[in-house]
Structures are given as structure tokens and as C-alpha cells.
Amino acid sequence: MKTQELDSNLYLLIKRYCIAVLLVGTAILFYACEDNEIAKIKTIESTNLPILEASNFETLVTDSGRVKYLLRAPKLLRFENEGKIYTEFPEGMYIINYDANKKITSSIKANYAKEFQKDQRWEAKNNVIVTNAKGDTLKTEHLILDEKTGKIHTEEFVRIISEDRILTGDGLISDQEMKNTKILNPKGEIYVSVNNTGTPATAPVVNDTSKTKEIEIPKQDSNRVLQFK
């Protein structure tokens, strides 16, 4: 009898121990999963939600009182991820650059763009068009702009349309005004005859919407002013 009673007590003790271990393990697993889900939610919130959103955005960007460029965009989204801030223009953007005399030197437009503030770098994609004061036009699908150096570059196919010729190739390095432009892998050069009116006779006319002209610039109290409309 004593042996059976001891066996019964031992069985109950082992059973209770197993149940306790199972409950503790379940609780640990539950809290671990809950913590993981909370971490995932926090990660999604921190990476996917903008800290700033604006529509019909327009701003004049200045440096030491000098107007650098005018920026227009249908939509602006600003994000912060791990201390890095960048601005996205999902519906495209249009930039007009000015010189020290407030004259237009070039313009850039694209159907999509990102600005990385800390690096002073822009990335433009999808139907990127750069036009200088002479009316020369660069077309490509991807372009990087370095504000620190004033250079633009790409590894994609490019087409440069000027008054008397059309250049094509892969890859390009240039200044923003397209005064010193180099196609890395030239593919073709087409010379265009010019008629008596001064426009190309054998190629489509490129509309020159960025001729050098004076503009009226409103006074700014700070180096970088955001205007929302």
C-alpha cells in the first residue's frame, strides 16, 4: 500500500510540475510574441508614416540671402528613419535654378523624386527632363543631383537635344547648367538642319520655356522657408 501511495504521490507531483512548466512556457511564448508584434508595429509606424505631409507645395530655397531654386510639387512626404530624414515627391516635382542675379539658369522636372537633406542629394526618376537657359534639353529616366558640387549624373540612357544636333548614349556627368556635359558611352549624334526661322527643319522643335529672364523674388527672413498652399 505504501508503495502504491508513494507512486501515486510521485505521479501527481510530476504531473503538477509538467503543468507548471507548460504554463510558464506558454506565458513566455505569449509575451515574446506580443513583444515581437509590438516591435513590428513600431517599426512599421516609424518607417512608413511621414512626419510631414503637404499638397500643392511651393518653396523658395535660399542660402545666405541668395535664392538658389524654386521648388514646386503636387505632394510632399517627409520621413525620418533611424535619425535620417528624407523627402519624397511621389507625384513629381519641378525645380527652377537661379544664379546670383536672380536669373534662371536651368530647370529640372520628374514624375518622382527624393531629397536626402543631410547628404544634400536629390534622386529623380521617371521622365526626367533638364533644360538650361539656352534651351538645350536632357532627357533620361534616372538622375542624381549633388547640391554640394552642383553636378548631375546618371548611368541610364540619355538624350540631349540642342539647336543643331541630338546626342544619345548611356551615362552622363554634367553641371546643372549643362555647360560642361560628358556622355560616358556615346551611341549616336544626329545633326539637325536649321531653317530660315532658326528652328530645326528635320526634328521636332523643343519648346524653350526657360530663357534667362528677371523675376521678382519675395524677401525671405531665413535661409530655408517652407510655404504651404
Image (spheres, rainbow, N blue to C red):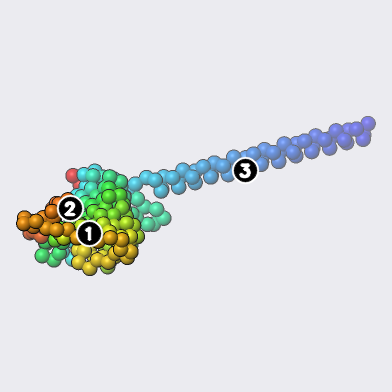
Q: Earlier in the sequence, mark 2 or mark 3?
A: 3
Q: Quadrant of residue 148?
A: bottom left
Q: Residue furthest left?
A: 196
Q: Give the amino acid type for the residue marked by disc 3 in the picture.
A: Ile
Of tags 2 and 3, the one toward the viewer is: 2
Viewer can see residue 52: no
Residue 170's spot in the image, x, y percent?
A: 33, 60
Q: CA distance from mark 2 to mark 1?
A: 10 Å
The residue positioned 15% from the left and 64% from the top of the image is: 99
Query: SS at mark 1?
Result: strand
The amino acid type found where label 1 is placed reads Ile
The residue carrying mark 1 is 190
The residue drawn where x is 87% and y is 35% is 7
Residue carrying label 3: 28
Mark 3 near mark 1, Cβ–Cβ under 8 Å?
no
Q: Quadrant of the C terminus?
A: top left
User: How far across and how far down the image is residue 161, in percent?
Assistant: 20, 57
Q: Which residue shows up at 30% across the image and 49% down it?
A: 126
| Residue type marked 2 | Ala
Left-right relation of 104 to 89: left
**Residue underneath mark 2:** 203
Instruction: Identify the residue at horizontal 80%, vertical 34% (top origin).
Output: 12
